[in-house]
Amino acid sequence: MRRPNRRSRKAFTLVIVLVCFGWTSCISQSIRKHYTQLSEQERAAFAAAIEQLMQNGSEEYYADIHTDPDQDGNPGNNFNGPDTDSQIHRVAIFLAWHRQFITEFERLIQAIDPRLSLPYWDWTGEFDPPGVNSRSALSPLWNDDQVAALGWTTSLIGEFDDQGQLGRNLGGLLPTTSQKDNLITSTAFSNFGNFRYELEVNLHDPPHGWVGGEMQDMYYSPRDPAFFLHHAMVDYLWQLWTENDHSVTFSQSTMPTFDGSVSGFDRIDPDDIRNTVTQMGIFYANPDMASLHLKDYTVHNDHLPVEFFVYPETIEVESTFQIAAGASVEIHSCESVILQPGFSILAGSTARIGTNGFCNAPAARAEMTVANDRPTPPALIEEMNTAKVEKAPERVTLKGFPNPFEESFTFQFTLPAEERVSMVLMDAVGKIVAMPLPSQRRTGGEHELLVDAHTLPSGMYTAVLRLHDTNQRYVLRVVKAD
């Protein structure tokens, strides 16, 4: 097998605060999106991160790992390799090994900008918007012909063909939507062995050949960034199969090892990464979703100092999405964040909800709301004290105390500059019950409002601070005790 030329390796229980100083100091979990869901800002940031990793030798290193997983000098990543103790193709752990592999690479991207995640390339074209054909060489992945349909200025990874001397030769056969649907729903693939074989041979293999060049090389295909978008799609299909009430227990308890330069790979039990949501905090989204649901996961920061969840559309945070004591999380949406009843954050944790998610509109803001279709459980009142929504570039704060309160309540807010502001207090059904601050101009700096609340019944209330000049809203949840 030809070895390519080597380049040099070079809410609510707490006041919400930012605990990560500078993007490069954080590593995060992710929401993996269809590549067409990336805004122009996110496209540019992702491409810049890939370029940096190609220049510093990271992609070369990952190609080496893919070639020789145990780094003993004997290529052995597939059933034809002489190094039988490090097979990662045509074996049961094919999906698990590559899941961890692309996750480790994603973390390199997130070390550059933790808001980023791996997008996926759905080669069936099922979710393509008008004007885009993901099954074509003219796709915005590779070519500028269709980028206007996405509001982009250039393709996502087309530039890297020449830059990396990848030798792409786009064309051929790609898997179809019917193949994808059949893989997930047919009883013929309820057995993991059958599922893995069908996915690897008939859906995973063809796109490697379709891209051509380095992607067609069984060993060194990770030299092409397309490898990671392709395998994110393969991984998504495994997750869909898992969520369709299927499961697997692996016979081996460790992955093929390597020299350890990529964190902890040799310590991973494939059974520990069978579900991207519950075990890894990685959520997949597609353009047909009305909203992205964060659920069935607890933020612990076992490996990551801050976990980021960034999505351009509505995010719904369900009660089964938990933030453990002392953990840190950031949730960013360009539309809205809805906190469902039962969602809780333990005391001592930190969280931030905002709009630092590559939003297209300069004045984009996320509105945090609480769904009121069913009663809020007592635990929410006991565990949650304050929360705010903030636009990342501004230093606006909104706090309240005591919380819970009885006869009176004090709001404190800080403005970065003079602004026309107003504040209303709403009950659980959204009815305005008080106006602590009628619309008026306030100077930059700290401000304090004392609210007489002795006539208010016990329960949860929402204070909304509106900044009229810059079109922002900050939300604080407060509780009146019995």
Image (tube, rainbow, N blue to C red):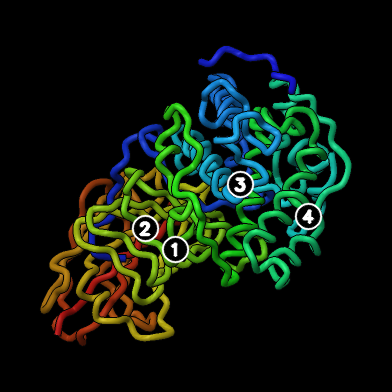
Report the side of 116 relative to 422 (left or right): right
- Mark 4 lies on residue: 124
Residue placed at 20% from the left, 74% from the top?
A: 382
Q: Which mark is residue 367?
A: 1
* Mark 2, residue position: 389
Report which quarter residue 312 is drawn in.
bottom right
Q: Position of residue 271 (x, y in %)?
A: 46, 55
* Few, some or many residues within 10 Å of mark 2 (<14, 14–19, 20+): many
* Label whose residue precedes the other's in the sequence (4 or 3): 3
Badge 3: residue crowd in 10 Å (few <14, some 14–19, many ≥20): some
Looking at numbered disc 3 in the image, what kind of residue is underneath it? Phe
Residue 367 makes an appearance in the image: yes
Q: Earlier in the sequence, mark 1 or mark 2?
A: 1
State the CA–CA distance, disc 2 to disc 4: 38 Å
Disc 4: CA contacts within 10 A as few (<14), some (14-19) or many (>=20): some
| Residue 198 percent location from the top left of the image | 73, 56
SS class, disc 3: helix
